[in-house]
Structures are given as C-alpha cells and as structure tokens.
Image (spheres, helix red, strand yellow):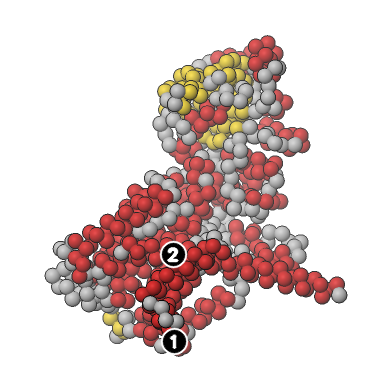
Amino acid sequence: MDSVARRISAVGAGAALELRGVTRMFGALAALTDVTITVRPGERRAVLGSNGAGKTTLFNCVTGDFLPSSGTIRFFGEDITHFPPYERIRRGLRRTYQISALFPGLTVQDNVYLACCGVSRGRFSLLRARPDDALMHSTDLLIGAVHLTAVKARRVSELAHGQQRQLEIALALAGAPRFILFDEPAAGLSPAERRELIEILTSLPSHIGYIIIEHDMDVALRVVESVTMMHNGRVFKEGLPQEIESDPEVQELYLGGGHD
Amino acid sequence: MSLIQEARLHAKPPATAAQRRAAIAWMEFDSPAPPLVAVLLLIMPLIANSFFLIEIFGTTLILGTIALSLMLLAGYGGMVSLMQLTVAGFAGYMVAVFGVSGSANISLGWPWWLAVPMALALATAFGTFGGALAVRTEGIYTIMITLAIGAAFYYFTNQNWAIFNGHTGINTIATPHFWGVDWRSDIAFYYVILATAALCYFAVLYISRAPFGLALQGVRDNPRRMAALGFNVNAHRVAAYAIASFIAALAGVLQVWNYRQISPGSIGVERCIDILIIAVVGGISRPVGPFVGAFIFVILRTFALDFLVKVGLDGNRFRLLIGIGFLVIVFWSSDGVIGLWERWRRRAVRTESRARGGSGHG
C-alpha cells in the first residue's frame, strides 16, 4: 500500500492529468485557488468536499467548459489549458454530469450512437448507419456494458432515473477513453443501483483512470485508491482512503458536523 | 432502412394493437395520405390547367423547398435563419449574371449547364459564409444577423448597377432547351420542379437519421453536452448552413426560371419573412411541414384578394388574411398544421381503438 502513497506523491512526467496552480475566478469570487493535482494513468481517485468546495468547477476547467483564470492543465503530458472541449474529448478525456445531460427526445441507442460518432471520424457522415456498421457494433456493446439492452429502443425521457445515470456512464465510455471524470454518478440511486454502479466502475479496464466526485463514502471509498479533499476551492488534503477517513480534521470538516 | 429505425419499429413486441399503431405513427408513411399525395402530384398535369400547374403547385413546391432549408436549420438545428430567401435570390441573380438574359451588358452568356453549377456553388458559399457569422450567436441574435444579411443584400442589389442592374433587375432570362424539349414549358417545368423538391425532401428526411442529422439535433438540444462528446458544435452548425444553402440555391434557380426575371423586389425583407411564416405555419418538426405551409400561403396569396373583393373589402388587405391565419394556427398549435394534423390523427386512432374495445366486450 505504501507503493500507492509513493505514486501519489510522485509529481510530474507520465501523469494522466496534471493541474498546476489552477485558479478560476467568477468576478471577485475564487471558485478554485491554486489547485495542484497530479493523477497518474490508470489511477482512480475521489474528490471529496462540501457543497461549494469547487469540485464541479474543477471538472469544468479540466473539460474546457470554463477556462482557468490562471494555471496550466496537462493531459498525458500535453498542455490542454486552452483547448476547446471537443479537442480534449478526442484525446481520450470523458466526463459525466451531476444532473444527467442526455438527449431526452432520442432513443437510448441514438444517444450512445451519437457518443460513438463524436469520437470517430464519421461525425459528419450524411449516410445512415448500416446494420454491420462498426460504430453500431460498439454502440450495442456499450449499451450491454451498462445493462440497458432491454430498453435500447426507448426514448430517454421514458427511462427511470437510475437508467439515465447508467446511460450517462455509457456516453462517457464511448470510443477509447483514457481518463474519465465522474460527477456524482450515484446521485439519487437506490442501494441496488449503487451496487450495480460500483460493479460497473470496478470492472472498467485497468488502464482507464478516473476522478469521481461522490458524497456517498460507501461508494467513493470502495472504487478509488486515493482521495483529494477540497475545501473552499483549495486542495485541503490528499492521501489514501483510510487516512482521509480517519483524519480528525476531515472528520470535523466533512464527515462530522457540517455535513449536509 | 437503418438499424436504428428497425429497432424502433420492433421496439415492444408484446404491444396492443393501439400501441402498435401509435408506434407506427412515428414512421414517415404512416397513413394512406403520403402515397396518395405523391400520386396526385405525379399525375397533376392531367388534372390541372397550366395556371394551377405552375402558379399554384409549381410555386408551392419552390417556396416549400426554400422553407425546407429553413426547416432543416430551425427544426433540426435550432437556428432560425431569415436569409434563406436571400440565398435563393443570390442563386437566381447568379443564373442571370452568368447565363443569358435581356441585359447583354451584364450577363456573361454562359450556357445554362455552366451557369447553374456556378450559381449553386456561389450561393452555397454565400449562405455558408453568412451561417459562419450567425453561428457565433444564439436565438434572437441569429435572427437579427441573418435578417441583416438579407436586408444588406436587398439594398446592395438596389444600388449596384454593374452586376445586379439596380432596381430594374435583370429581365428575359433564358431557360434551358435541350433534347428537343423546352424545359420551361409548363408540363416539363412542373416535373423539373417536382423532381427537385422531392429530391430535397427525401435528402433532408434521410439526413435526419444519419450521424450528421442526429448530431445536429443533439446540438439543438444540448450544445454543451455535444462538445463533451467530441463534437465541434460550431462546425456542425456551419455544415448545416452549407446544406441548407444548397437546397435554397436549387429552389432559387427554379424561381428565376419560373419568372424569367429577378429584381430587388423578389428578395425584399418581407419576402424573407414570408419564408419564416411558411415554415412555421406548416410546422418545422418534419420536412413535409414547409410544403404544407407553402401550399396554404400560395392559396391565400392567390385567392384572398378575390375573396376579399367579393365580400366587399379592399383586396389589398390579403396580407391581413394571411396574418390572421398565421395567428390562428400558431395559437392552436406550436407546431403548425403538421402538429394539428398529428394531434387529430392520434385522437382518431384513440377513438377507433376505444370503439373496437367496446364492441369486443359487448
């Protein structure tokens, strides 16, 4: 286990995702202040913190929805700080949303098919897919991987909340993801659905690393090997799950009193 | 047929008859109406006199095709462009400028088979460039920019004499003759229009289920999510403008052959807005909507004047009638006549299945 600790502390070359001094201002309000995080390839990490700690802003800076006010972001060594979102996605970065961001008027299959098109060269194709199409094939595989085959012809608006969360994950797995940002994937899920989510997360190929924002410690600590604790837009503490869980300061801040 | 569609059709095997009917209602040819309309359109020259053939049905199909290009942008892409008629007019002007016309000092006299591809290419480039300006904005600003482009082109043609011959415009434009056929003779021209309109209609229908069309609908519903799936949202929007411009340009060429002349009056701002009215009245959720809207518009425009005079009102107020019709339809259905039609059909299907269920028990 201390090899994990060593790897967490090892900064620099070979990192999957490397944030250095990332600050994001909204007017005079600093949502992120001097955030420096390094995640190695294949690493699975949880980001914890109370509401307003800057977790989702962190994700938005990494995916390019917001540009950081200062600092740099590197993805597998490449400086992506000023890349548009789609360029980051095409390099293997993926994300899911806290509130499902799907296409409710389209079917499950069309949603996943779109995600597969987005990271392929067939994006602008004016020809409809044939049944033997490679993208169609990977679409079906993905739908199977998140256990939605039975409802693949349904419109997304007809799906239950838990199924929509699973679809959200399927969209993030399209193409060849190298690193995924999960924004509260367990939000609103039943205990059974949580178990299914944990199974999906732990069965991901080992080369795919991720960061997961999750309030449910039972879920978060079961699927990660390291934890970053954020508070008021700053990195407050980093360490192994057990260390963070038993840390008195963290207890005070997050797990104990002020937890909402 | 694509796998997606097949999957959709075979969605729920153990469905009741009513449910199956409802599922089939999402198909394109869901009732006897479309094939009937297709046959009617094909044999129209046998039924209609030359006035109805060109002035009513020909004009309907041309205006419908221009409005179809708006439907592609607005219905699938969420971009309301008021410059579709401008793009069509641009193509018409280019046919006049490069081809043969009465204004020998302006027209270059190219044969039609050179002038038309040139006109289509230039008009598509023009519309794509306008689209590239417009896609940086959303909603009402898109409308403003495209309206500004339309207005600017109108005033430019009015004042430019070297190319556009000012407010006089260009007259007696030559139309194609080959294989011993005068393609502007009523029946031949009607089939040229019908073939072009059908081609554009089916192309839009087909594209709507292809990756490009699906992605365009995704861009309409959630551009931010599309970017997070790897799509360059603005590039997709510009590409949609390119396709829509080509469709509008095709209709523009037919328009100029129809009237054999073009002047700033043909591309005025109020004409641009007519296209929006046609698309909205017909319904912009499906490609057939613009044609329905165009038919209503042409009928009103042609007969409202006589009707108003007959009931003792000023015939020049026919636009009032169009305006009232527009208000009524938009008030009752946010998706135009197509929306009304679909709602009526769904109700008919429900009543029918209820009647059947009743007789089964009794």
Category of crowding for the residue at label 1, using alpha-carbon neighbours closer than 10 angstroms: few (below 14), some (14–19), many (at least 20): few
Q: Which mark is residue B277?
A: 2
Question: Which element carries disc 1, helix, strand or loop?
Answer: loop
Left or right position of A199 against B337: right
Spatial CA distance of label 2 from label 1 is 27 Å
Give residue B120's quadrant in the image.
Answer: bottom left
* Image spot of residue A107 (x, y percent): 62, 53
Q: Is residue B238 visible?
A: no
Q: Amino acid at mark 2?
A: Ile
Residue A18 pos. (x, y %):
49, 23
- Counting the numbered discs, the total is 2
Tell me the subunit letter for badge 2. Answer: B
Q: Amino acid at mark 1?
A: Ala
Image mark for residue A99: none
Residue most extreme to the right: B362
Residue that lies at the very extreme toward the left in this rendered image: B105
Marks 2 and 1, the one that precedes in the sequence: 1
Q: In the image as oriented, which residue stretches furthest toward the front?
A: B312
Q: Are marks 2 and 1 on the same chain?
A: yes
- For mark 1, name the chain: B
A239 or B131: nearer the eye? Answer: B131
Q: Which mark is residue B48?
A: 1
Above or below, A1 against B332 in this view is above
Secondary structure at numbered mark 2: helix
Q: A232 above or below A84?
A: above
